[in-house]
Image (cartoon, rainbow, N blue to C red):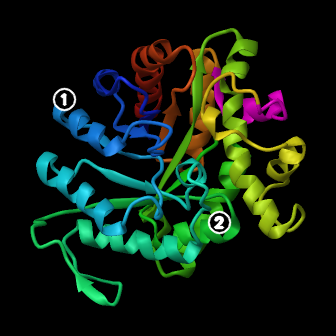
Amino acid sequence: MDFGVVFQCDPPGRELVSLAQQAEQAGFSHVWTFDSHVLWQEPFVIYSQILAATSSVTVGPMVTNPSTRDWTVTASMFATLNEMYGNRTVCGIGRGDSAVRVLGARPTTLGELRECVTVIRDLAAGRTIRYRDRDITLPWVDDGALEVWVAAYGPKALALAGEVGDGYILQLADPDIAAWMIGAVRTAAERAGRDPDAVTFCVAAPAYVGDDLAHQREQTRWFGGMVGNHIADIVARYGGDGAGVPKVLTDYIAGRQGYDYAEHGRAGNTHTDFVPDEIIDRFCLLGPVDEHLRRLAELRELGVDQFAVYLQHDAKQETLAAYGEQIIPAYRQVVAS
């Protein structure tokens, strides 16, 4: 199992480049960022600097969307970075959340997302695509390649991930929920005539290493609110009983009373009191090193190929160091033995 790390593009951007260098030295294979251009700085500008300052990490958004950029622009940006730095990017993509909602827009349709996945991947690889009733290619792309990983929670989105995604991103680390959702993606891939083992499975969630569990919960409660945005969309579409997702997800948002995107992804925000401690413990990896190793072993048994650590709390450096010095080496030693 690989390890990724997820940052927000807070200024100064140079600090993010430094954190990416530390992540590479610590053994992380992927450096991800939020992609919400109003709330944070533009990630693709920062990716260029990260790639220039590192030698092996893969970079990409967790996640971009089909709405805030023309699809051909997104493909061109990925293809340009790959030409400069050797196919070291990955495109995480979903229907859109904060990036579109702060503009007063709504997430895109699954039909548009499906088409967007194909357009971005094929253009970045140098293939010709049909777009707006004409054939389009990037004639300067040579030996390009781009994987597109789809983020999803709902049953139709999970099916889409299995049918067209090179990877699937699940933004929570509960083993029971992960097993259900990974199973849904695998089933969809099989029905589409694809090899489900060819789909990369990435679980992303906050991780905080230490002994003060009460403090860790308060620093990561925001994550339950972020996940709740997506679950609320599913419930609004299908109803609580017909949502087609594990009941624990639809039950915990019953007390949700709206969401302020000005505090999106921020520790200590004021609108996630509805998130119970049980959900935080299930969704996140908290506690001492041994507890992290236990949870990571559970995820590996489910077929998870990458665990991506959200570092949006007050111990970024400490947690990054703990993973690099203790958790990643110990995990790899156990796997090797």
Front one among 329 and 35: 35
Q: Which residues are magenta?
A: 271-286
Identify the residue shown where x is 39% and y is 25%: 11
Residue pointed to by mark 2:
184
Q: Position of residue 271 (x, y in %)?
A: 77, 33
Disc nearer the start of the sequence (2/1): 1
User: Which three-letter amino acid code belongs to the residue tagged 2?
Assistant: Ala
User: Which three-letter amino acid code belongs to the residue tagged 1?
Assistant: Ala
Q: How many marks?
A: 2
Q: Position of residue 63 (x, y in %)?
A: 48, 50
Residue pointed to by mark 1:
53
Q: Position of residue 314 (x, y in %)?
A: 56, 15
Q: Position of residue 251 (x, y in %)?
A: 88, 48
Mark 2 is surrounded, within 10 Å at the Cα level, by few (under 14), some (14 to 19) or many (20 or more) other residues, namely: some
Identify the residue shown where x is 22% and y is 77%: 127
Q: Is residue 261 above or below residue 250?
A: above
Identify the residue shown where x is 31% and y is 45%: 44
Please state if 124 lies on the left or on the right of 183 as rendered. Answer: left
